[in-house]
Image: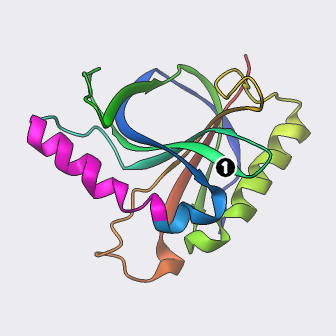
Amino acid sequence: MLSTPERIYKEEQPYVAIRRTINMKHIPTELPPLVPKVKEWLDGQGIEQAGAPFFHYLAMDGNNDIISEVGFPVKQKTAGDSEVISGSFKAGHYAHLTYTGDYKYMKDAHMALEEYIIAKGYKEEMGLGSAERPFGSRAEFYPTDEEQVPNPDDWVTEIYVLLKD
């Protein structure tokens, strides 16, 4: 199930994350195990998360290798270490929708958001990817605790795409 797409303004949001370059087909197996690693790091540093865990997609090459980050928003910028990096989501307008359902069907939600962006005449911000293949800033936030909500049909994902102002 999809909410109606909308354009919203978000303030800058600092975060901590682990960055990986992986092939898109490995997202379901390689990125989720990083969530508890980042959470453990936050707890070890005594830093409180300021929102749900996320996957942040920065760039993709012609082989479907994607630069991605897995992390948590935090209340203020903090230093990382050799594995956990500090970053922030840029302040600006984002195309947004809420997807409810199994993650394996989330591609349809991304396609619906892309159609909305095109229909409204918006442009995706493309300055955050690589020089070879700029991708922009797309993020999926996962507010559902899968242990508390075991049915994948009820999992909620918030999807944001940074727009060019």
Of 7 and 158, the residue lying toward us: 158
Number of numbered tags placed on the structure image: 1
Classify residue 55 as left or right of residue 162: left
**Quadrant of the drawing holding the N terminus:** bottom right
Pick the residue in front: 96 or 139: 139
Which percent across, then down, holds residue 77? Answer: 29, 20
Q: Secondary structure at mark 1?
A: strand
Residue at the (90%, 40%) spot, across then down: 119
Residue drawn at 54 percent across, 43 percent down: 68
Q: Is residue 73 left or right of residue 58?
A: left
Mark 1 surroundings within 10 Å by alpha-carbon count, few (fewer than 14), some (14 through 19), many (20 or more): some
x, y percentage for residue 61?
74, 42
**What segment is highlighted magenta in the picture?**
30-46
Image position, residue 140 (x, y; %): 53, 49
Q: Is residue 148 above or below residue 140?
A: below
**Residue type beneath disc 1:** Asp
Residue 71 image-quadrant placement:
top left
Judged left or right of residue 113, residue 50 is left
**Residue at 74%, 21% in the rendered image:** 164
In the depicted structure, whether residue 105 falls above or below residue 13: below
Kindly identify which residue carries mark 1.
Answer: 65
Q: Is residue 152 above or below residue 108?
A: below
Mainly helix, strand or loop, the magenta region?
helix
Specify the quadrant that holds the C terminus.
top right
- Which residue extends farthest top? 165
